[in-house]
Amino acid sequence: MGNGIQSIHPFVMFFYYICLGFFAMFFNHPVVLLAGCLSLIAVNLAHGSGRALKQWAPMMMVMALLIILINPFINSRGTHIFFYFRGKQVTLEATLYGIVTSMSLLMILLLFISLNAVLNGNKILYIFSRILPKTAFLVMLSIRFVPLLKRRLTEIQDVQRLRGMTIRQGSIRNRAKSGMSIMQILLAWSLEEAIETADSMKARGYGMVKRSPYIPYRFTKMDRNRLVCLFLLFNLSVVGGFLGYGKIIIYPMLGTLHFYPLDWVVLTSSLAVMLFPVFVEGREQLKWNYSD
Amino acid sequence: MELFRLNEVTFSFPDADQNVLQDISLTVHEGEFVVIGGGSGSGKTTLLKLLKKELAPTGNLKGSIQFKGKQIQDWEERTLIEQVGYVFQDPDNQIVMDEVMQEIVFGLENLGYSNFEMRKRVAEMAHFFGVEDLLMEKPSELSGGQKQLLNLLSVLLMKPRVLLLDEPTSQLDPVAAKELILMLERLNKETGMTIVLVEHRLEELYAMADRVVFIEQGRLLYNGSSRQVIDEIYQDQAIRLFPYLPAFARLYMEFESQPLRESIPLTVKECKQWLGGDETVGGNAANLHEEREDRPVLLEMEDVHYQYKKKASFVLKNFQLTIRKGDFFALVGGNGSGKTTALRASIGGVKPQRGKISYGGRDIRKMKDSEWHGKIAYLPQNPRTYFVHQTIEDEMIRIGDRLHLSDTKMRMDKLLDAFGISHLRSRHPYDCSGGEMQKAALACILMGQPEMLFIDEPTKGMDPISKQQLGELLTQLQRQGLTIFMVTHDIGFAAQYAKRCAMMFDGEIAADGTPHELFKGNYFYTTAINRATRETKQPEVLTYEEAVGSWSVHATI
C-alpha cells in the first residue's frame, strides 16, 4: 500500500481534500490563498507528482493570467479607478478579484492533481462503495471491461483489415461502413462471452444476500488521531472565517488587507491543515534518515 | 463418502428431439480425481453444469442427481454455492472485478462474510498459491495462466468440497497448462479436495486421475481407472477413441506382444522403462539435409525490431525470416516470446520501428490495403472475429461480391463440400461449435484463392479428432500450392504437419529447420513421446504416427 501519504487511510485523505476544496472557495485573502497554492505544490512534490505538476504548469499559468487580465476589463465595479478603457472604468477591486479568483481556481486544480495521484481508482471506489455501493460495484465491473474490449477490438481489426474492411484507408463512406461492421462484431462477440461472466458471478453467489464489502484499508489509531486533528483545525479555521478573518472585502469598496492577530491564528491553523500530508511524508523521511 | 450420485440421468434441451445426455449413472467419491473425456459436443460440459445447480441448463431432466446423499434440489442454495466450486474454460470471461484482490474476495463478499474471515482466508490461500505480489495487479495485465490460477483461487476461497473444472487448460499454452494441472494435483493430494475435470487434452491427466470417464454422444461409454479404460478401449477396438488416449499407452498397446493392464505406461518414465534403456546407434538426429532453395521467396522479414511502448523492451529484435512459396512453416515458442507479434508484423497489424518486411519482393509499407485483399488470408485464433453476416452462406456470397468473382456459387459449393460443412451453410456462425466455426472461416477465407495463409494458434481448445482433421486439411491445401505461416504452441501438431519449424526465443528465431532437426533431443521443447523414446532400443520418434511407420518389429519388445 506504500508508505507516507499513500499509507494514510483513504477516508482521512478524502476529508483532507474536502477541507482544501472548502478553503479554496471560502477564504479570499490573497495571503491565505497563496499559502494554499504553495502548500499544495509542496504536497504534490511530497508524494512525487512533480512530473504531473510540470505537465499542467503551462496550462495553469495561462489560465491564471487570462483571468487576471480579462476580469478588470469586463468587470467595472469598485471605486479605486486606475484608468478608463473605451469608456469603462478599470478598477483596483476588479483586478484584485481576478487575482483572488485565479488563485482559488489554481488551488482547486492543484488539489485535483494531488487527488488523482493519491486516491487512485480503487481508493475512490472504496470511498464511494460506502456511500453508493451499487454504483461503485457497477463502475468496477465496467472498468474491468475496458482493456478486454480494447484487446478484442485490435484482434477484430487485424482480421477484418485483410478482408478489405479497414478504417485506415479508403473513402470516408467505406471507412464508416467498415467501422460499423467492426463494432457489430465486437458487440455480438462480447455479449456472447458476457454470458459466461454472468454465469461466473452466479456460481459465486452474486445477489444472494447483501454484499459485505471487503475493506482492504485498515483504519488505524494513527488515522483516527490524524482525522481528529484535521477536524479540529478545520473547524477553527472555518469559525475564524465566519468571523471575517482570512477574508477581505473587495466589492463594493476594497477593505483593508491588514493582518490582525486573529488572522494569524486562522492562517496558521489552515496552513496546518493544508500541509498535513507534507508532515506525514516528512516524518516518514526523517525516520528513514535518523533511525537504523 | 459419496459426494455425487447420478442415477440414470437423461437430459435434453427444450425443443430438441435428441437427448444431450442419456441414462448416465455415475458416482463421485470424496477425495477422488475424476477426469471426464470425450469429443466436443459429446455432452460432457452439460453433465458438469448439471452438477452445479446455479449453472444447470434449462431443459428436460430425468433421473436424479444427489449431493451428499440428498437430492440436489433440496439443498440450501448457500451451501451448494460454497461447497461446489466451478472453474470455466475461458480465463478472461470469468473475471469480474478490476483488481486481483477484489476478484479473489468476490464470492466471499457476495455471501456476506465478515472482514475477519475474508482476511484470514486470503492470507492463507494467497500464500499457498504464492501470489502475494499479484494482489494489487490488474487482471488485464496478467498472463493467461495467471488468470486461470486467479479463477481457481477465487473459487477455492469459498472452501468448496468439490471442484468442477470445464476444460480449464484449453486456452493456455502447454507450460501454463501443466502448472495448473500440477496445482490441481497438489490440491487433491495435500488437501484431499475432490476434483472433477472435463478435458480433451488428456495426456498428462491419465497419470493423475483416479478415474477416467468417457462420454460419447451423451452416453457413458467407459468408467474406471486410467489403465482399465485404456485396456477396455483397446479390447473393444474403439478406433475413434484412440486419439484421446495418451501416446505412450497407444504405443504399448500397439507394439507390446502381450499387453498387461497393470503395466500400461502412463508417464515418460514408465514408457522408458518399458522400452528398455539400451541405446540404438545414435547420430541419426543430426542428419541435416540440404533444403531446396529454388522456390521464389514470398515473405521476407529483415532485422525487424518492435516494441509496444517507447520505454518497453523489444518484443522483436533482429527478427529474420524468409518464407518461400509452398512452405508450411510453423513458428513455435512460449508465451511472450513474441511469436504472435511476429505474425501481426508480417500482415501489417503492427508497424515495426526498424527493419524491412517485404511480400513478393515489395515492401509492405508501400502496399495499399486493397492490394492485400484476396492475396493474403488470415485465420485468427478466435474465428468469431471473422463473421459479419447472419449465415455462413451469406458471408461467402458477400465475399464473392467483394472480390468480383464470377463463379461464387460454384466455388462456395466446392469449398463447403471439401470441408464437410455443407449442412451448416444456412446456420449462424456463432451457433456452430469451435471446430466447425474454424472450418467455416477457413472456407470463407479460401474463397479468394489466396497465395498465402497466416494462422494463429489454430488448435487452441480443439479435441484430438478436430485437430487431426484440421492438420490433414492444411496439408492438403499446402500440396495444392498454398503457402502457410502458422504460429502455435502445440508442438505435437507442428511436428506432425508442418514441413519447416522455427523456435522463437526472446524476440528472435533461435533455431530453424525441419521438425526433426528442431525437436529431437530437446528436454522440454518436444513431444512427450520423443522424451519417452529417446535413448531407448527403438528409434527416436516425434509422433505416434511416425512410430507406427518406423517401428516395424513387434517382436523386439
Image: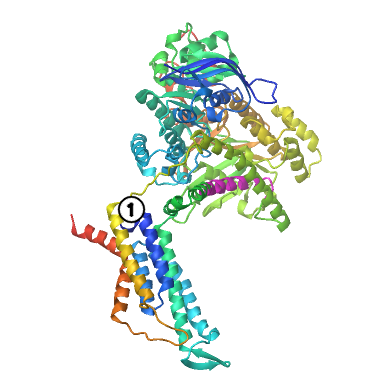
**Host chain of mark 1:** A
Per the picture, the main secondary structure of the magenta-coloured stretch is helix
A147 drawn magenta:
yes
User: What residue is shown at x 71% (from left), y 39% (from top)?
Assistant: B449
Above/below status of B39 relative to A263: above
Kindly state the secondary structure of the residue where label 1 is placed: loop
Up the image or down, A45 lies above or below B515; here it is: below
Task: Residue A191 in the image: state x and y as whole percent.
Answer: 61, 41
List x then y, in percent, for residue B506. 44, 43
On screen, residue A171 versus residue B25, left or right, reads right
Out of B73 and B410, give the one closest to the viewer. Answer: B73
Three-letter code for the amino acid on which mark 1 is drawn:
Gly
- Is residue B179 visible in the rendered image? The answer is yes
Q: Residue at x 42, y 40 (%)?
A: B105
Q: Position of residue B165 (x, y in %)?
A: 49, 28
Q: Is residue B4 above or below residue B473?
A: above
Q: Residue A16 appears in which quarter of the rendering?
A: bottom left
Between B299 and A147, the residue placed more toward the observer is A147
Residue occupying the point 43% across, 36% down:
B154
Q: Residues within 10 Å of mark 1 (few under 14, many from 20)?
A: few
Q: Residue furthest right?
A: B406
Residue B6 picture location, percent across and down: 53, 17
For mark 1, what is the residue? A2
Please tell me which residue lies in front, A268 or B199: A268
Q: Quadrant of the N terminus of chain B?
A: top left
- Which image quarter: residue B482? top right
Residue sitting farthest toward the top = B258
The segment highlighted magenta reads A142-165
Report the number of discs.
Answer: 1
Magenta segment: does it hold B173? no
